[in-house]
Image (cartoon, helix red, strand yellow):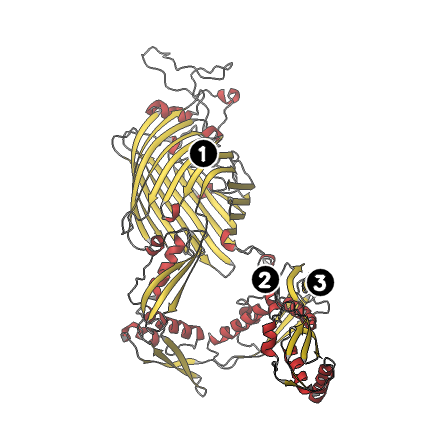
């Protein structure tokens, strides 16, 4: 066969050479070049001016030019003593257009084509056309789409270029019908398959696609199967074979593993050897605890990581630790030896940042816990990454350590960040469950990259008008003492806010400062002056009238507050792991027109369950109470519940106690108002308010939420990945179960829907929600179903909020 190939090549070359006698080359002329340079031709042909050329050398010229794979045709001729080489270049690929691909991204397919030499700008070889088809079909088969077909069209372009149009029919994805494990006697197939990424399908498979075959997933599951046994003592477990079979219609996949479980091994003894730069007390309890335990590869790996971390935190960045099992088959025992090679102690030369086009260097550097010139510490380097993520300025943060060239004991630490929008500047338009909102905003958490938060707002809607200015410097001192202030004016019509009808005009200013207790805990203090003017209208609710009659309708207060917060969340936006807890107390100080205090406890918790599922919990407890000469809690400070940002499925602020109609001594039916109270008994004092029961039938005001002084609220969430969404960091989807209500510990006999805290009176809802952070602002959608709404409580199964910055 090899001789036939040589004969065929020789015949092919001879066809490209015109017969001529040997002669002395006085010049070389190359004809037909378009893209290839003349210089590159002279670099490969084995002849120069002044050489003699014969038939053998002509063959060598043709062979060398064909070897470049740049030409489809080559002719050798002469004119006098001039050697003429005529070539026909192969076309170059001007563009590759893909259509019909949805399951696999264009980038994935182009990467596959690049592997067989098909790439924009490269030479196009028609002989590889079938390779293109085969490679694309192979890529789809590796992802369970065995019915995929590929059609390719070549389109000639000017200047010897060609465009390749590839049309893909992906076909339908084959589903895994059955996964069989043969040879397993110790563990059931069901037990083993629980850890597999591939599965035979379930109710949630339409979200996770776990019943769709993928070669990469199969490789991962093979590793999972091996780890399952080796982590349970079966050190010599092996997979004898794995088979993939298809149904006739290529719609169902059957996967079969043949396994040899082997014997179960226990650990006989553990020894640590090598240069150990720390005390035995650090590890002896851990290694001793392994003796007589079942052998587990996961445990061995964990102890290797333990030693590596201990060494890494002491400056040994390139330490090597290896756990070696010495197997005794007769007794089914293993002797473990951990070999430690710490290497040289490593120092951090520089800490560098990339990607921070807006955020100033010092804002990132102040979050570092690793210092330049000091021993490197893995924990300190990782702590810097976590602290950057918690800032909320970055979409992505990564870190790597880079050895310094020419040294063996120095590294540079490189943090790479991807910034995201942290605020808005300009006008805004939005819609929520309370209607259209218009205004001007400057709200920036990272103002000009300084790390300071600056806010200037003018907002107006049908229910409120707000003007505010705020500033916060989180590093007013180098010790991370924060300092901030705010000034505000707020006018709110609560009648348009799903709340009992009254208006407030509030103005005030405040100052705050905070102090870090540790890397994850912080104490904050604030002082706020506020003046609030209440307009109760012509027909106020009885609760509102009673309070104003007793306390007045203009209040000046000075409030002092303290809060404690601990945060271990892994990132500021859409966390996936960790928790945060905050406890705050605010109280008016002596000399204020009203005396009351407020306590709030808020909790967030996230726990990853798998790569695609996260359990989440959010909760809040609130308590408001009057003290001193103030007998009733201020109604305008009450808690409310219900709505897309609270208890989904219920209209905003509609849960809890509801107001009664206006107190009237004598109701004017024609004008729909209450006249001034009268001194009917002549004692010189106006009569106490008298509730007119007929006002319910004649007043245009009906009972409305008035809020309560106790709030209980929580949400259990199962956060999942939406299929076909590339950037999961900007979108969050979850199934949720919300619960909560607003209560009062001072209910009056005449109040509606008022009750003391009780589990029986909690309200519940469940559903699915999506939050999407876009360049135009946040968008949130929720579809929910309340389970036990009361007769006075209004429900709303679809809710959304959307904002736009322009």
- Most foreground residue, 176 or 381: 381
- At numbered mark 2, what does the secondary structure look like: helix, strand or loop? helix
- Most foreground residue, 669 or 167: 167
- Most foreground residue, 736 or 521: 521
Above or below, comparing residue 120 to residue 16 in the picture: above
CA neighbours of label 1 inside 10 A, class few (<14), some (14 to 19), many (20+): some
- Label total for image: 3
Q: Quadrant of the N terminus?
A: bottom right
Q: Who comes first in sequence, dot 3 or dot 1?
A: 3
164 left or right of 751?
Answer: right
Question: Circle 1 is placed at which residue position?
Answer: 459
- Most foreground residue, 201 or 35: 35
- Which dot, 3 or 2, sits closer to the camera? 3
Q: Position of residue 517 (x, y in %)?
A: 28, 52
Q: Position of residue 313 (x, y in %)?
A: 32, 68
- At numbered mark 3, what does the secondary structure look like: helix, strand or loop? strand
Whole-number angstrom distance, CA of label 3 to CA of label 1: 59 Å
Mark carried by residue 107: 2
- At numbered mark 1, what does the secondary structure look like: helix, strand or loop? strand
CA neighbours of label 3 inside 10 A, class few (<14), some (14 to 19), many (20+): some
CA neighbours of label 2 inside 10 A, class few (<14), some (14 to 19), many (20+): few
Above or below, comparing residue 528 to residue 387 in the picture: above
Residue 416 visible within the image: yes
Question: Circle 3 is placed at which residue position?
Answer: 156
Q: Are marks 3 and 2 in contact (CB under 8 Å)?
A: no
Above or below, comparing residue 221 to residue 685 in the picture: below
């Amino acid at each position: 066969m090899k001789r036939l190939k040589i004969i065929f090549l020789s015949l092919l070359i001879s066809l490209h050479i015109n017969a001529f006698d040997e002669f002395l080359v006085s010049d070389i002329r190359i004809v037909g070049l378009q893209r290839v340079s003349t210089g590159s031709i002279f670099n490969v042909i084995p002849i120069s001016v002044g050489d003699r050329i014969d038939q053998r050398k002509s063959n060598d010229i043709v062979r060398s030019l064909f070897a470049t794979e740049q030409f489809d045709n080559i002719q050798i001729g002469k004119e006098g003593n001039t050697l003429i080489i005529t070539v026909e270049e192969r076309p170059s690929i001007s563009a590759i257009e893909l259509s019909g691909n949805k399951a696999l991204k264009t980038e994935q397919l182009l990467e596959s084509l690049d592997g067989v030499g098909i790439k924009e700008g490269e030479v196009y070889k028609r002989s590889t056309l079938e390779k293109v088809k085969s490679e694309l079909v192979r890529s789809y088969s590796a992802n369970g789409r065995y019915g995929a077909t590929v059609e390719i069209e070549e389109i000639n372009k000017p200047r010897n270029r060609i465009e390749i149009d590839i049309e893909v029919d992906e076909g339908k994805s084959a589903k895994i019908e059955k996964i069989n494990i043969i040879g397993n006697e110790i563990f059931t197939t069901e037990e083993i398959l629980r850890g597999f990424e591939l599965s035979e399908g379930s109710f949630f498979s339409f979200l996770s696609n776990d019943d769709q075959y993928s070669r990469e997933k199969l490789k991962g599951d093979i590793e999972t199967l091996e780890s399952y046994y080796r982590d349970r003592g079966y050190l010599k477990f092996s997979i004898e074979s794995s088979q993939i079979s298809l149904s006739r219609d290529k719609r169902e996949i059957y996967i079969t593993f043949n396994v040899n479980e082997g014997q179960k091994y226990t650990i006989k003894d553990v020894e640590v050897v090598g240069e150990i730069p720390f005390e035995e007390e650090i590890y002896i309890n851990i290694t001793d605890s392994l003796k007589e335990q079942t052998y587990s590869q996961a445990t061995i790996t964990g102890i290797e990581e333990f030693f590596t971390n201990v060494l890494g935190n002491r400056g040994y960045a390139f330490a090597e630790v290896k756990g070696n099992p010495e197997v005794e088959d007769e007794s089914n025992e293993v002797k473990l030896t951990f070999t430690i090679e710490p290497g040289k102690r490593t120092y951090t030369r520089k800490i560098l940042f990339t990607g921070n086009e807006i955020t100033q260097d010092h804002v990132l550097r102040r979050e570092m816990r690793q210092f330049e010139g000091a021993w490197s510490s893995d924990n300190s380097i990782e702590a810097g990454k976590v602290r950057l993520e918690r800032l909320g300025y970055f979409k992505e943060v990564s870190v790597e350590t880079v050895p310094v060239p020419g040294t063996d004991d120095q590294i540079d630490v490189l943090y790479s960040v991807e910034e995201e929008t942290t605020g808005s500047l300009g006008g805004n338009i939005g819609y929520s469950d309370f209607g259209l909102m218009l205004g001007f905003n400057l709200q920036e958490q990272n103002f000009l990259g300084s790390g300071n938060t600056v806010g200037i707002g003018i907002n107006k809607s049908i229910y409120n008008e707000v003007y505010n200015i705020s500033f916060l410097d989180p590093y007013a001192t180098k010790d991370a003492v924060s300092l901030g202030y705010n000034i505000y004016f707020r006018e709110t019509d609560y009648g348009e806010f799903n709340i009992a009808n009254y208006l407030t005009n509030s103005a005030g200013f405040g100052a705050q400062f905070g102090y870090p207790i540790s890397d994850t805990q912080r104490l904050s203090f604030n002082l706020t002056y506020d003046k609030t003017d209440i307009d109760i209208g012509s027909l106020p609710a009885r609760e509102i009238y009673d309070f104003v009659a007793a306390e007045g309708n203009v209040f000046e207060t000075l409030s002092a507050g303290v809060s404690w917060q601990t945060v271990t969340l892994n990132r500021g936006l859409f966390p996936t792991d960790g928790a945060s807890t905050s406890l705050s107390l605010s109280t008016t100080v002596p000399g204020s027109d009203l005396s009351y205090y407020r306590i709030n406890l808020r909790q967030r918790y996230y726990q990853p369950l798998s790569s695609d599922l996260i359990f989440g919990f959010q909760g809040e407890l609130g308590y408001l109470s009057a003290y001193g000469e103030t007998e009733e809690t201020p109604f305008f400070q009450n808690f409310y519940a219900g709505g897309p940002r609270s208890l989904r499925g219920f209209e905003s602020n509609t849960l809890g106690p509801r107001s009664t109609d206006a107190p009237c001594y004598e109701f004017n039916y024609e004008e729909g108002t209450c006249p001034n109270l009268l001194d009917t008994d002549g004692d010189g004092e106006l009569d106490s308010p008298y509730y007119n029961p007929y006002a319910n039938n004649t007043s245009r005001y009906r009972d409305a939420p008035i809020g309560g002084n106790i709030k209980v609220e929580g949400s259990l969430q199962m956060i999942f990945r939406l299929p076909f969404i590339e950037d999961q960091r900007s979108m969050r989807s979850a199934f949720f179960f919300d619960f909560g209500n607003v209560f009062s510990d001072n209910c009056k006999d005449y109040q509606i829907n008022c009750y003391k805290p009780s589990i029986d009176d909690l309200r519940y809802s469940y559903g699915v929600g999506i939050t999407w952070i876009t360049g135009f602002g946040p968008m949130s959608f929720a579809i929910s179903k309340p389970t036990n709404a009361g007769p006075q409580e209004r429900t709303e199964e679809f809710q959304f909020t959307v904002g736009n910055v322009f």
